Amino acid sequence: MAALVAVIMGSESDLEQMQDAVRTLDELGIANEAHIMSAHRTPDAVARFAAGAPAQGLKVIVAGAGMAAHLAGAIAARTTLPVIGVPVAAGPLGGLDALLGTVQMPRGVPVATVAINAARNAAILAAEILALSDPALRARLEAMRRQMAEEVAEQSRRLVEGT
């Protein structure tokens, strides 16, 4: 099955955080692929990937990077597919620079942006976008939400009971 979501990271140091997106997409049964590309060190590869993504059958791109974090914006500049940015905590600013570099896009080139290190949320947002035209995926997302609610209820029960 062709990938519907691409998970792109700026360097191998982003892999630990971005694995959460891959795992979540896998849990939801969404075909995905992962790549390492740098907006600054491999700009031509990023441009080719972004421009060709729709023809490859991709529907959503999740892009995570730390420090200057121009990856999501560089991809969004070359495609009309939804791009979800994940600022990755790195360097002396702990991800604040990545957050600002990801969320502060110019008018007309949006990047949906999740919290610092929130690759799981980026994957869930990608799934919600895909679920607009996939009732089975919507049902899996609803089941995930029910499971989260049950886990919180169980945590509360244990707290109340002191176990």
Image (spheres, rainbow, N blue to C red):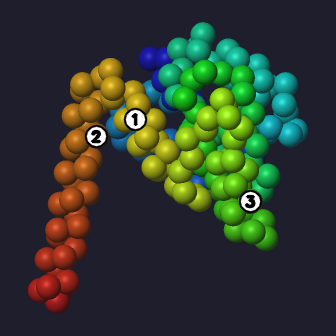
Reply above or below: 4 against 123. Answer: above
SS of the residue under disc 3:
helix
Quadrant housing residue 149: bottom left
SS of the residue under disc 2:
helix
Residue placed most toward the observer, 148 or 81: 81
Left-right relation of 147 to 69: left
Q: Amino acid at mark 1?
A: Ala
Q: Give the number of the mark in front: 2 or 3.
A: 3
Residue that badge 2 annotates: 141
Residue that badge 1 annotates: 127
Residue 106, given in percent of the width and then of the height, sits at 71, 38
Q: Count residues near mark 2 (Cα–Cα under 10 Å), then give few for <14, some for 14-19, many for 20+.
A: some
Residue 132, given in percent of the width and then of the height, sits at 33, 26
Mark 3–mark 1 Cα distance, whole angstroms, equals 27 Å
Residue 83, given in percent of the width and then of the height, sits at 58, 33
Q: Count residues near mark 3 (Cα–Cα under 10 Å), then give few for <14, some for 14-19, many for 20+.
A: some
Residue placed most toward the observer, 34 or 156: 156
Residue under the image location 68 percent in, 62 percent down: 95
First reached walking from the N terminus: tag 2 or tag 3? 3
Q: Quadrant of the C terminus?
A: bottom left
Residue under the image location 17 percent in, 80 percent down: 158
Residue that badge 3 annotates: 97
Q: Amino acid at mark 2?
A: Leu
Residue under the image location 74 percent in, 59 percent down: 97
Quadrant housing residue 53: top right
SS of the residue under disc 1:
helix
